[in-house]
Image (spheres, coloured by chain):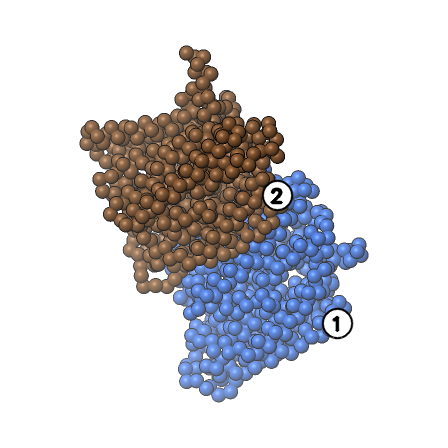
Amino acid sequence: MTGIIISLLVVPLFSALLVFMIPNSRKEIFRPIGIIFSLITLTQCFYLLLSDYGKTKFVILSSYKWIQSYGLEISLGISGMSTLLLLLTSLLVCVSLLSIGNEHAESKGFIGSLLALHFAINGVFISGDLISLFIFFEALLIPMYFLMGIWGGENRRYATIKFILYTVFGSVFIFIGTVYTAVISYGANGALAVDFDSLSNLTLTSSQSKTLFLLFTFGFLIKVPIFPLHTWLPDAHVEAPTAGSILLAGVLLKVGAYGILRVSIPFFTEGFLAYKNFVAVLSVIGIIYGAIVAIAQIDIKKLIAYSSVSHMGYVMLGISAGGYLSIEGAIIQMINHGITAGALFMLVGFLYERRHTRNISSFGGIKITMPRYAAIFLFTSFASIGLPGLNGFVGEFMILMGSFNSYKVLTSIAAFGVVLAAIYMLWAYQRIFTGPISNVKNESLKDLDTRETLSIVPLVLLMLFIGIYPSYIESFVIQEAGFISETIALFKDIK
Amino acid sequence: MNDITEILGINFVVIGPTLSLLFTTLVLLFCTITISTPLYVKKYISFLGILLTIFTIFLKFGLFASGGVTSFFSEKILLDEFSLVGNVLIGLVLLLTFNSFWKTSEVIDNKTTEALILILMSASGFLLMVDAENFIMLFIGLEIGSISLYALAGLNRGDQLSNEASLKYFLLGSLASCIFIYGVALLYVSLSISGVYETSIAISFIGPDNVPLTSLIGLIMILVGLLFKVAAAPFQAWAPDVYQGSPTGYVGYMAAVAKAASFIVLARLSAISLRFILDKFDLFFTAIVILSVLAGALFATNQTDIKRLIAYSGVIQSGFILSGISFGVYGISASIFYLITYIIQLIGVFTVFSIISGQLSSDFKISNLSGLFKENKFLTITFSIFMLGIAGLPLTSGFVSKFILITNLWSYEKYLIVTVLMLTTVAGFYFYLRPIWVAAIEKTDNSIEKIKISISDKVLLGFMAALTIYFGLLPNTLVNITRWMVENYL
């Protein structure tokens, strides 16, 4: 099992280096190489999912001495939630490699950066200590910097710098939190042990717990992003190339929520109990605010970006309610949002490649020229809105149901987010697809070809599968959600 | 005769590195004034001299292994962990920069030998400086080293900026030397001491609370003299002009060697001389650290000249290194780790610059990097690695050094400094990423045509970039070395 964990790092890194090694004259094989290697990772993730570790809470599988004299170790491990997110990552990397146009697919820098990003994201989800978590969390930025900087849109310089500075600013807090935890752990264990096992045995005073919770959570919340720290997200999404957007919405946003579930809540529970109401209020503001702003957007990508703010608000609401059902819902919503938002960004990318514009007003009636595309878009929109029977419903329903006990008013307000989602998604659909063709340029639009259909179909199938059989995906997170909610409940009892 | 040798502690192995560099300069001088020697012979002579120096440094390790910490030459020269690491560091700087300063000296008209002599001479001075126990000896080493550097800065006589750099460096440097020697004098007047160990013994004898004000002022003046050399604010004014004006091929050496030697001496002062009264200097060091990182970050943000940018970044790094040195022994080991990794990145950056812009040029705008990636992939990638290392991104040595340093500061409960340092790190990403953006990302019609890189340069750059990554992934060995350095001074 350790071998598989390590190969989750080695395979993407090796494939990235391999792509960089191949001379530019063989540019047609960059994409196949990337796809083959991400399929290998995907298979490994499946293997992990079906193994004993696919359903557990976090277990550390291997540790390596990093700096001996400080007692620092690098630990790697796995859990149910991690496995699902790893699976999502490999799937999204694979389909986004398939979906991108030839201009990007024939650039080794692009494919290489994407695979390097895959490496760093995998690293985040399997790290078993604060140091490696931080290292991979920051390492994400390098490939993302190049992806956005080189292949981004017009205003990419501003968006890239904003994205980097926001994230780095957040990670400084995580860094200080790590240092603080390490020093506390040094007092208790005689070594700077920050692996998750020793952290769970660490006894913290009330003020330490609160400070540490604030430090870590602030850093992670920027990444989620929560209102009012979300302003980097629309810019980053609009300027990033399609594949970058897919991974940004699909996985990178989950890194923040993952960090809160993995680090902030289990280890600094007292801090969580002290500040959870605050987080819940912010996330509900985010749900409503994101949805309302999304209605007003004229750029499709920006619309989906703001819808992400709204959807991630649900995740944060579920997490801050802290019950068993709501946390489980939050984890499932993370996966679901990864699938739907990834699919939406991919679809927008297809349209952008054809027309080189994302303005809603320059479309209209393209259902006539692109029937297949329109059908898939409608299906994905329904999933995003949360139509019963599709995946979006499962997570949001569980979150709303689970949070209602703790936050009656807030949850009631949050439920309106679903209505607003229907407004912005369906209205956008109406403006883009229905009616007569208003723009001559749209008359000759080609429908999706086989490659593009092939890259979107796995996501569509997943939306349907999770929608009708949610207990399958639920079975992987039961233990983990149970563990986290029990930790919280136990702490409440002690108090 | 033997008795006298023993009593005086005369031992030529311990000053072997200094002597072998002096010997090399004499041979070079002799070659120039007597027979007309071809250039490549001079190259081999100086390279052999450097190898000889490194060999003698290893001999010192043997001496240390048998005798431990010892004073020589009637307590003028000290053999301890600091001097060993300092020697190795200066030897490393000479080796890593040899290629670029040789190439610069080769093209500088008719002054090849002078340049080589100045460089080797300054290295011998700094070697003496890290070996010195007595403050007067330290001053002699510092002056031998610095005066050579002043001349080196102005070696490109036709260039106005080079002249300005030299003059500015000389005037401000002499002022700093005056302050230093005045501090030594005050210390001697008040306590009749002038040595590293003498100071700590005297202070422990009269008690930390009874140290006269005069000697405290003297110590601060000594520190100021050294802080000037590492360009810590508010003594940083010379650095940007000197970095910008000096021939690019020399700047890597000039910056690295002065920083290495001065920080090693500062570390030794903090670990030995000031160990009983370190808390009295708390405010002084805190102020210097905060001023350095803030001033550095503030001025670095809007630089257009990349050498000035690196100079201001050097001010920030000095603040970082100093923060560890000034508060305790484990902090010192973290600082030395920081120093070593930073020096490698610094030399790497300047090697790249001198390859791109030519060895002699003084002006080097960030915009000159535009379109570098198109034809020069290797240069861009190594350059990016060094810049990301200085910025402190994980997976590079810069992150590990910052992590260790901050952990130590936090355990000393220096929360204010930690906050300021971390904010500076964030700001740093803004100006460290800008050159990378210009070189690798920005779409432009400019393209720098393919620059031919010699194999030796390629190997050196690859080696330094590999070290930057290696210490970022597996820092254990180097951390252990720096811990070994300070273990006896707990």
Image position of A234 with respect to A30: above or below: below
Q: Is residue B470 left or right of residue B279?
A: left
Q: Residue at x 42, y 33 (%)?
A: B139
Q: Residue B446: x percent and y percent?
A: 31, 61
Using the rendered image, report if marks 1 and 2 lie on a common chain: no
Read off the residue under disc 1: A408
Q: Residue at x 54, y 32 (%)?
A: B272
Q: Residue at x 65, y 78 (%)?
A: A419
Chain letter, colour blue in render: A
Image position of B58 with respect to A121: above or below: above
User: Residue B89's quadrant in the figure?
Assistant: top left
Q: Chain of mark 2?
A: B
State which quarter of the image contains the C terminus of chain A.
bottom right
- What is the CA distance from the residue labelled 1 to the residue labelled 2? 46 Å
Q: Is residue A436 visible?
A: yes
Give whichever of B472, A119 is nearer the camera. Answer: B472
Give whichever of A39, B217 is nearer the camera. Answer: B217
Read off the residue under disc 2: B412
Q: Colour of chain B?
A: brown
Which label is found at residue B59? none
Give whichever of B380, A164 is nearer the camera. Answer: A164
Q: Is residue B248 visible?
A: no
Q: Secondary structure at mark 2?
A: loop
Image position of A162 with respect to B484: above or below: below
Q: Residue A464: x percent and y percent?
A: 62, 71
Identify which amino acid the numbered label 1 is placed on. Lys
Q: Is residue B160 left or right of residue B206?
A: left
Q: Residue A156: x percent and y percent?
A: 44, 66
Identify which amino acid the numbered label 2 is placed on. Tyr
Q: Residue at x 62, y 44 (%)?
A: B411
